[in-house]
Amino acid sequence: MTLSREDAPISAHQSTPSDTAVPRRRVWRRYIPALLLGLFVIAMIRPGLGFRTWAWDFTEPGRFRGDINRNFVFGAKALDNGYLNLYEDDIRDQPSRGWKLDYTPLRLLTFETWAAWTRRTHPGASQWEDSYSAPLINYYTTLEWLAAVAALLIVRHWLIECARADQPFAPDVSPWTGFVRAMLAFTLLWFDPGVAIIAHGWPSPNMWVIPLYLWTALFCLWDCWFVAGLVMGIGAMMQGQQMLVAPIFILWPLFAGRPVRAMRWVCGFAFAFIGITSGWMLSVRPDLQSQVRFVNWRAVSWLVASLLMLLLLALHRQFPWRYRRVWWLVPAGLAVVVINVPAWAIGDRWIIGATMLLSVGMIAALWQFGWTTKRYLLPLATAGLLAGCMPLFGATTAWWDIGFAYGAERFPNVGGTLANNLGAILHFNFNWQDIHETCFAIAPGTWFNWGSESIAVNNRQVLLTIYMLFFVAGAFALARQWRRRGRNLLIALVLPWVLFFTLMPQMSPRYAVFAAGIGAICIGRSAGMSLLVLYFSALTVEQTSLCMMFGNRVGGDHFNALFNGEMRDLFERINCPGPSWATLIAAGVFMWMSLTGAPRRSANSSAEIDSPGPGTLPQSPAPA
């Protein structure tokens, strides 16, 4: 099968014989800005560490000790009872869904690693103490630094791409393009007070979302969509909130007319997300009262045999045998049999139909496409086979029920007294309380005489529908800016998290940090948008510090300039729903800026070109 335009190597600027020659002795000058940026990033480490040390000491009166101790206790329990057993233990001990654990798998693994380090240095530790926090805080600091580096690279890369689009006939753009704004993006995130209070004041793992999302976006801009999917799959396993924003990386290339890139991202995401659960997929625990797990050899042998058959089919074009197309029908038939034998043994027609469809689809795809596509489809097939272990071999689903589904059910409030968003306005002005309360009912036969009974629509469904509509519009805006090389793409990348905090129910006051941290890249567009991002940073500090003061009962005591009775009274007076209206206005500005500002080009400027990866070559003007 011939390479399509999407499968071909991506380069927005192809070199031609007429390129202007650059003397070799001057080539090294092009690397000076990159070298200076690297030195700047390294030089900012020390002041950043000092800022975080100050933040840790300054927020000590309001530190949310209950939450960080809970993290340590669950990590210690995973260490004692077995990491793979903890979700099933919680379901066994709390059959009425009054579960205490709501951690995603990699979040739990992180705290287990922390507990293991603490046990080695402080034998017998069972509760958290300040002296145990050093490795966890260093881990948070490392992720913040990686997030700031990603912000720098995104701004630098995209401003160079915009400069190339604005000057299509220039031999190349200046190597200093985006230099100052890239440094500002790094600085804004590295010294953001909202990120600091979440990571070093609370401290909360919500900050983990920021680096994983920014690196995912960066790999997409570099045209490494499979790697971007891997990063987001890991990020979703660390913090479940990413699941509600991750579809932006599917809709973005689809709206831009690049479905192969969406497929590559899905393959990477599925492989990372399901691959992390392979411990549960390939093991079994016959007795929940015992902590002993056994390897599920039936699942392992089925997975290995199926993958070998699929790999053999993927390589069928590499064998120059005569009548090879007829001969390869044998392993194709064997693959169908091997993949579907467990389903036939169960006898459930729905499972049989699902596995048959899965096997035929995978075999047809591996037979039809070239290797450039097959190399992405094989990880997707691996993820599908691993997921099939749940219905076929009884693999546990406790990691999903508790780590993801339960987190969406645990707090049923539409809006609270601390999160300033649309839910707060509906809560205080229209008395919306619970997400399960009926908002309105659809009468029978309303839509083309469909339905014999009325349909009750609850509050959560209404808010989710509003969020999804604006989210799809934001994906369209992102695709448009990407195709036309608009600087407003930097705003469109932040928009999903602005909509997430503004429109979704069940919001925590800490979730404003997503827009505050990721919004550092908006400096690549304008200083005005960065000022708007600072609103979300200030909102994070106000909401989070008020919650910390509530949790620690900070009243008349005067600990410092932030944690005292006067500040608590001030925050209570101005909080909810007053700033909520400002949040809605800010979200409207982000939406408007994301949809507008795409540059117009003439027919000779090669508009709507594909997205280039790093290191593309300059393009000289084409001959008339």
Image (cartoon, helix red, strand yellow):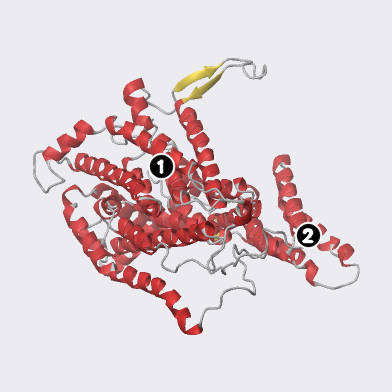
- Pointer 1: what residue? 498
At x 21%, y 39%, the residue is 550
Tell me the kind of residue under disc 1: Val
Tag in front: 1 or 2: 1
Residue 605 visible within the image: yes
| Mark 1 closeness class: few <14, some 14–19, many ≥20 residues within 10 Å | many
At x 38%, y 35%, the residue is 411
444 to 303, vertically: above or below = above
Tell me the kind of residue under disc 2: Trp
At x 57%, y 17%, the residue is 454
Q: Quadrant of the C terminus?
A: bottom right
454 to 405, vertically: above or below = above
Quarter of the image where one finds residue 57: bottom left
The alpha-carbon separation of the residues under discs 1 and 2 comes to 43 Å
- Pointer 2: what residue? 367
Quarter of the image where one finds residue 45: bottom left
Give x and y (percent) for residue 101: 39, 46
Q: Nearer the viewer, residue 412 or 266?
A: 266
